């Protein structure tokens, strides 16, 4: 499987351990010890203050993998095994939000985006402090007049950064905020990031950008596994891009999916052919009616972007269904009683699935 950073490896390792415990029917029994097992005494701690912090991070990273978010914890003394039991027994409510920020893991980014380096010469011009609208910059006489930013006053306007003749002020990004194209994620008073659902388009960029792995998708893996375990028919609809994640043949990959317990595997490409055909007819009609252009309806992240940020584009979006939409129809006709699971790389498909009664779960 293709990994581009260690955060992905850690997330995969944790989920694999939990699934294996579930398979052995030992998840509820062993899950409380997993944080200790993953970070035993005297082990190396990466990016945390101590081993106890690291264990807390492991604990809370299991929440979204079980299908919870941080708001589901009402009592810190409630063991993980209680949450695991409820998830396995189907006693957990399905979440409306798709992603969750792990508070314990989100604490290492800067409060303000600008820092003054030792390149500061303490110059006479003092352009930085002269241009600061909040008076957040002073000059330290003990350090030959070098500038100092008061982070409690700084509003991240960047005027000091723009005015310094020595380029002694650097911009320090917050990766998740930098990655979000619609500014849907921001810090609270404690420095913990939160996702604004009214702005989020579910592109997943913040999740991939966080260097500490503090942003998780609220997983539906155990919902799917529980349905398979109960003997219910479960059909996988597989996005073509999944094949690029594994160095194997299509036959082996689909065979592995069936070996897990899926009743059948249907390629989303089947639905894509219907989307292309319908959009072509629709485009011809729209152009004939005088509409200057038409955009696709395939991408659920784009649909959310239009709805939440550029509503004037709504009349130009195709009314045709997405490949997942038509594939779900095909599966419904062939396997009317089956649970349908979309398997693909796109988190936004979770949002689309909420609006499609034929799609039960999404695994990304």
Image (cartoon, grey):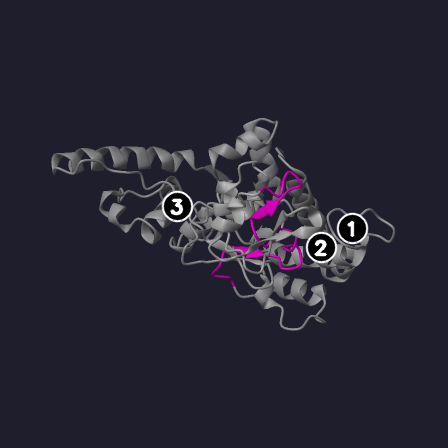
Residue 149 visible at all: yes
**From mark 1 to mark 3, how far is it between C-alphas?**
36 Å
* Mark nearer the N terminus (1 vs 3): 1
Q: Which residue lies furthest to the front in this view?
A: 124
**From mark 1 to mark 2, how far is it between C-alphas?**
8 Å
Q: Of residues 325 and 131, which is closer to you in this image?
A: 131
Residue 204 visible at all: no
As drawn, 137 above or below 258: below
Q: In the rendering, which numbered label is found on residue 38?
A: 1
As drawn, 205 above or below 25: above
SS at badge 2: helix
The span shown in magenta is: 94-123
- Badge 1 density bin: few <14, some 14–19, many ≥20, Cα 10 Å: some
Q: Hey, which quadrant is residue 7 in on the image?
A: top right
Q: Of residues 124 and 62, which is closer to you in this image?
A: 124
Q: Are marks 1 and 2 in contact (CB under 8 Å)?
A: yes
Image quadrant containing the N terminus: top right
């Amino acid at each position: 499987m293709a990994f581009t950073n260690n955060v992905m490896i850690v997330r995969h390792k944790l989920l694999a351990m939990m699934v294996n415990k579930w398979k052995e029917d030992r998840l509820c029994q062993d899950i409380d010890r997993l944080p200790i097992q993953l970070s035993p005494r005297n082990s190396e701690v990466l990016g945390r203050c101590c081993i106890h912090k690291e264990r807390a991070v492991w604990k809370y990273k299991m929440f979204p993998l079980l299908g919870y978010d941080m708001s589901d914890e009402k009592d810190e003394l409630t063991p993980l095994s209680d949450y695991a039991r409820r998830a396995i027994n189907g006693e957990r409510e399905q979440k409306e939000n798709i992603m969750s920020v792990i508070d314990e893991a989100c604490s290492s980014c800067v409060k303000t985006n600008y820092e003054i380096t030792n390149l500061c010469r303490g110059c006479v011009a003092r352009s930085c402090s002269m241009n600061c609208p909040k008076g957040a910059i002073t000059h330290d006489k003990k350090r030959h007049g070098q500038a100092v930013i008061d982070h409690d006053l700084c509003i991240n306007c960047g005027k000091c950064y723009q005015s310094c003749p020595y380029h002694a002020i650097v911009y320090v990004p917050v990766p998740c905020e930098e990655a979000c194209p619609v500014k849907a994620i921001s810090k609270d008073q404690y420095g913990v990031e939160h996702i604004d659902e009214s702005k989020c388009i579910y592109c997943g960029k913040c999740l991939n950008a966080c260097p500490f792995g503090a942003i998780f998708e609220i997983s539906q893996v155990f919902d799917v596994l529980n349905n398979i375990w109960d003997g219910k028919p479960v059909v996988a609809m597989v996005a073509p891009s999944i094949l690029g994640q594994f160095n194997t043949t299509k036959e082996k990959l689909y065979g592995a999916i069936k070996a897990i317990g899926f009743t059948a595997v249907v390629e989303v490409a089947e639905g894509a052919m219907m989307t292309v055909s319908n959009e072509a007819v629709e485009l011809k009609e729209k152009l004939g009616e005088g509409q200057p252009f038409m955009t696709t309806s395939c991408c659920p992240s784009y649909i959310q972007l239009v709805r939440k940020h550029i509503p004037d584009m709504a009349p130009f979006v195709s009314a045709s269904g997405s490949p997942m939409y038509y594939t779900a129809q095909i599966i419904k006709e062939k396997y009317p009683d089956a649970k349908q699971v979309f398997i693909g790389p796109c988190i936004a498909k979770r949002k689309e699935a909420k609006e499609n009664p034929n799609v039960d779960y999404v695994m990304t």
